[in-house]
Image: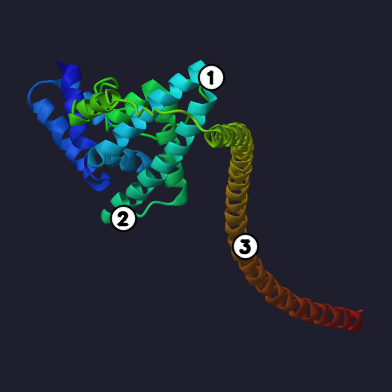
């Protein structure tokens, strides 16, 4: 089937380092075209190179499956606790998630460094946000589990995560590996039981621990609300910055057009100046020639006047 074929091709491509992606994708598309499957060739050719954060996440899925399974398990517990309003469970799961996220981010750094792709703080933030999204939303968890992410994911509270264009190939086709069996085995582990009568000190200690858990839950809730508020503020600032960028781009375009017009005008003026200099040179030459002609004419006039005076004198004598 075409869906299976495109998913298989994506599984192969998204396991590669980004530098190898384009050449490998083009080769697979060429093979599909040679096999007279133009639709598959077009779909393979349309696959996008993963973002830096998505590449790291895809590597985490492949290289650290046990930790990813643990994250998925925590996500299931978190969603159940959220649905039932179990504050104690939310507090416990929140602590376990922070511990696991710290470990996964360290592994992400090691994977990237091993491939000479040291991640920036912004990239690691995207990795962390995607891992958090996978615990919040089951569909996001399945998307991460494919190992074919094109971009990072972002959770807003407990709302469904936007997965549009986030996964290459079939989004629901996560690889069936031993992680599935490991997850099922963990789910069937017996819970620890304690017996024996409780001492008064135990009750006081349990009360203190409960109070601490409640306080931690409240801090986590406040931190979550603050994080959501910070996210909204950041998005507003990003929107404002985008609008400002658009305005400056419009201003730049207008300035470029104005500069082009002025350069054209300068070119015309320089050409006209060159013409005027040539015309001035001709006019000055004509002026000098006219002055010489005038001088000759003045001499001729003086001579003619002398001749007139001589002729008048000769006529007077004859009279």
**Going from the N terminus, do you reach mark 1 or mark 2 first?**
1
Check contact, mark 3 vs mark 2: CB within 8 A. no
Q: Residues within 10 Å of mark 2 (few under 14, many from 20)?
A: few
89 vs 32, left or right, is right
Q: How is the image coloured?
A: rainbow
Q: Position of residue 66 (x, y in %)?
A: 26, 37
Residue 113 numbered tag:
2
**Earlier residue among tags 1 and 3:** 1
Q: SS at mark 3? A: helix
Which residue is identified by label 3? 279
- Residue at 8%, 27% (x, y): give it: 34
Q: Relative to 65, is 141 on the left or the right?
A: right
- Which mark sits nearer the N-terminus, 3 or 2? 2
Q: CA distance from mark 1 to mark 2?
A: 41 Å
Q: Which quadrant would the C terminus be assigned to in this image?
A: bottom right
- Closest to the camera, between mark 1 and mark 2, is 1
Q: Is residue 161 visible?
A: no
Residue assigned mark 1: 85
- Neighbor class of circle 1 (other Cα within 10 Å; few <14, some 14-19, many 20+) is few
């Amino acid at each position: 089937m075409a869906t299976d074929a495109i998913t298989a091709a994506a599984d192969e491509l998204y396991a590669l380092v980004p530098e190898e992606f384009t050449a490998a994708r083009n080769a697979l598309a060429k093979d599909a075209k040679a096999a007279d499957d133009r639709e598959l060739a077009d779909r393979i050719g349309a696959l996008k190179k993963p973002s830096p954060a998505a590449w790291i996440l895809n590597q985490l899925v492949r290289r650290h499956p046990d930790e990813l399974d643990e994250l998925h398990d925590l996500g299931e517990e978190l969603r159940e606790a959220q649905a039932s309003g179990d504050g104690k469970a939310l507090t416990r799961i929140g602590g376990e998630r922070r511990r696991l996220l710290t470990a996964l981010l360290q592994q992400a750094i090691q994977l990237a460094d091993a491939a000479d792709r040291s991640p920036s703080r912004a990239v690691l933030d995207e990795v962390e946000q995607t891992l958090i999204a996978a615990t919040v939303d089951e569909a996001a968890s399945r998307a991460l589990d494919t190992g074919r992410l094109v971009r990072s994911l972002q959770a807003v509270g407990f709302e469904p995560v936007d997965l549009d264009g986030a996964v290459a190939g079939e989004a629901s086709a996560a690889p069936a590996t031993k992680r599935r069996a490991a997850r099922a085995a963990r789910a069937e582990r017996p819970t620890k039981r304690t017996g024996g009568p409780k001492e008064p000190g135990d009750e006081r200690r349990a009360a203190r621990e409960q109070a601490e858990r409640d306080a931690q839950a409240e801090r986590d809730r406040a931190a979550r609300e603050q994080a959501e508020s910070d996210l909204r503020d950041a998005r507003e600032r990003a929107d404002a910055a985008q609008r400002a960028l658009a305005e400056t781009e419009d201003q730049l375009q207008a300035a470029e057009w104005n500069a082009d017009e002025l350069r054209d005008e300068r070119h015309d003026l320089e050409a006209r100046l060159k013409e005027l200099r040539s015309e001035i040179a001709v006019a000055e030459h004509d002026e000098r020639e006219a002055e010489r002609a005038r001088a000759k004419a003045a001499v001729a006039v003086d001579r003619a006047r002398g001749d007139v005076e001589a002729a008048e004198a000769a006529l007077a004598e004859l009279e």
